Amino acid sequence: MAVVNRGFGSKGRSDDPRLPPGQHLTDGFPVLSASPTPLIPKDTWVFTLTSETGEERRWRWHELLDLPSEPVVTDIHCVTRWSKFDTHWEGVSVDVILAGVTTDATHAMATCYGGYTTNLPLSELRGGKAWIVYRYGGEDLGALHGGPARLLVPQLYFWKSAKWLNGLRLLVRDEPGFWEGAGYHNHGDPWREQRYEFD
Ligand SMILES: Nc1nc2c(c(=O)[nH]1)N[C@H]1C(S)=C(S)[C@@H](COP(=O)(O)O)O[C@H]1N2
Ligand SMILES: [Mo]
């Protein structure tokens, strides 16, 4: 009798060392949104960094574009089990946004137009691991995929890569975001298959 359990069934294995456990490759680019797509004109777009004491720093669209940007080529992994290799992005490293910020924060909440939130440890946002991206595949990032700008944190499940990003709120105590408060894993490392709360 075949016994399917979490050890053998959902924690699938793959021969491709680039594919995290339980994932399969897709050539397409699925769209996953918990709410309708907000349309945000660039001339009213604002990104706000809020410190743990409530101090705010703001970047308008042209100020974001004036920051040093870089190309990012990376694999992405969605908790619904699709992965996509070699996606091409361009944007600003979160290190640039946090440069010169002295903080006691350990975590940050990414906030979005439309109300979505997701929490991350600062250690996943710093050190060249996360970007605010505004181009995909050589074109301006489309609204369905989070344009004008989204967070890209490719080493975590893609729900952490907040679309329609409008801020980072620094936290001295971690708080769950939208999916993290609804039974998904707080951290979301695809290589450790941290899909749900108790994984
Ligand atoms: N603002 C916002 N960001 C979001 C989501 C969302 O619903 N709203 N969905 C998340 C999830 S679950 C995934 S898998 C990816 C999907 O990004 P895509 O639609 O570009 O594939 O966006 C993440 N970021
Ligand atoms: Mo997702």
Image (cartoon, rainbow, N blue to C red):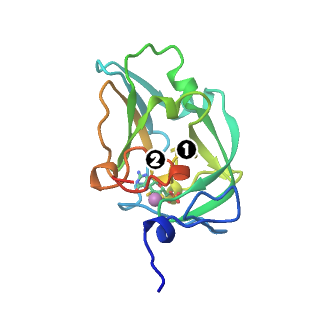
Q: Give the x, y percent position of residue 29.
A: 59, 65
Q: Give the x, y percent position of residue 107.
A: 39, 30
Q: Which residue is mark 2?
A: 160
Residue 17 — which label? Answer: none
Give me the C-alpha separation between circle 1 and circle 2: 8 Å
**Quarter-wise, where is residue 45 in the image?**
top left
**Quarter-wise, where is residue 169 in the image?**
top left
Q: Give the x, y percent position of residue 167.
A: 41, 35
Q: Which residue is mark 1?
A: 152
**Ligand 1 closer than 8 Å to label 2 CB:** yes
Point 35% across, 21% down: residue: 51
Residue type, label 2: Lys
* SS state under label 2: helix
Classify the position of the C terminus by image quarter. bottom left
Q: Are marks 1 and 2 in contact (CB under 8 Å)?
A: no
Q: Is residue 25 left or right of residue 115?
A: right
Q: Give the x, y percent position of residue 64.
A: 55, 31
Point 54% across, 28% down: residue: 126
Q: Is residue 49 left or right of residue 190?
A: left
Measured along the vertical axis of the image, is residue 37 above or below residue 129? below
Q: Residues within 10 Å of mark 1 (few under 14, many from 20)?
A: many
Point 51% across, 59% down: residue: 78
Measured along the vertical axis of the image, is residue 173 above or below residue 145? above
Front residue (pair 12, 130): 12
Point 47% across, 65% down: residue: 7
Residue type, label 1: Leu
Q: Residue furthest front?
A: 1
Front residue (pair 199, 76): 199
Q: Residues within 10 Å of mark 2 (few under 14, many from 20)?
A: many
Front residue (pair 61, 195): 195
**Quarter-wise, where is residue 196 in the image?**
bottom left
- Precedes in sequence: disc 1 or disc 2: 1
